[in-house]
Image (cartoon, rainbow, N blue to C red):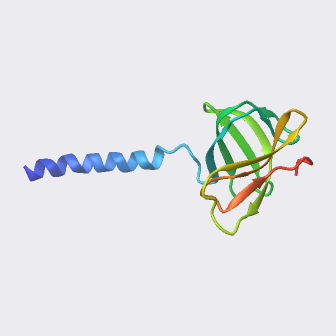
Amino acid sequence: MSIVAAFLAVPLASSLAFAGIFGSHKGDNEKSVNLTLSSASKIPNGPKLAPGSYRVMVPENAPKPEVVFYRDGKEVARAQAELVAESQKNPATEVYSNTRGNRQVITEIRPAGWSQRLVFSASGK
């Protein structure tokens, strides 16, 4: 009986290891976080974002980080931001914005678990 179990365990372990290597769609050169906007917002010098849930991704080690917003798996916005180091990891994802006219303009995002924050500027920096 143990011989049969051994023959079944090896292919199962191999297939799980293989799935782990190729099953992830996230690249090793990206950081990402889930984000929910409660109201319509705008990125400075960039697109408008409707209220809802987004996946925010940032390529690591990029000279000028570009933040990409995905909704339902589709890219909906892209903007440049500055990565600013924090003294400790952010405990929760927080979005900071200013009101300009009748619209919320995102000034920074502090992603949960990151030791950086994303700062957006009106100059497109």
Residue name at image x 42 percent, y 48 percent: 20
In terms of depth relative to the viewer, which is nearer, 99 or 11?
Answer: 99
16 relative to 37, above or below? below
Image coordinates for residue 14, horizontal then vertical, percent: 32, 49
Count numbered badges in the picture.
0
Do we see residue 61 in this rendering?
A: no
Residue 42 falls in image quadrant:
top right
Image coordinates for residue 31, horizontal then vertical, percent: 63, 52
Residue name at image x 73 percent, y 33 percent: 39
Residue 120 lies left or right of residue 17; in this view the side is: right
Do we see residue 45 in this rendering?
A: yes
Residue name at image x 88 percent, y 52 percent: 125
In terms of depth relative to the viewer, which is nearer, 93 or 54?
Answer: 93
Residue name at image x 79 percent, y 58 percent: 63
Residue 122 lies left or right of residue 47; in this view the side is: right
110 relative to 98, above or below? below
Image coordinates for residue 112, horizontal then vertical, percent: 61, 54
Residue 13 lies left or right of residue 118; in this view the side is: left
Of all residues shown, which one is farthest toward the bottom?
A: 87
In terms of depth relative to the viewer, which is nearer, 49 or 29?
Answer: 49
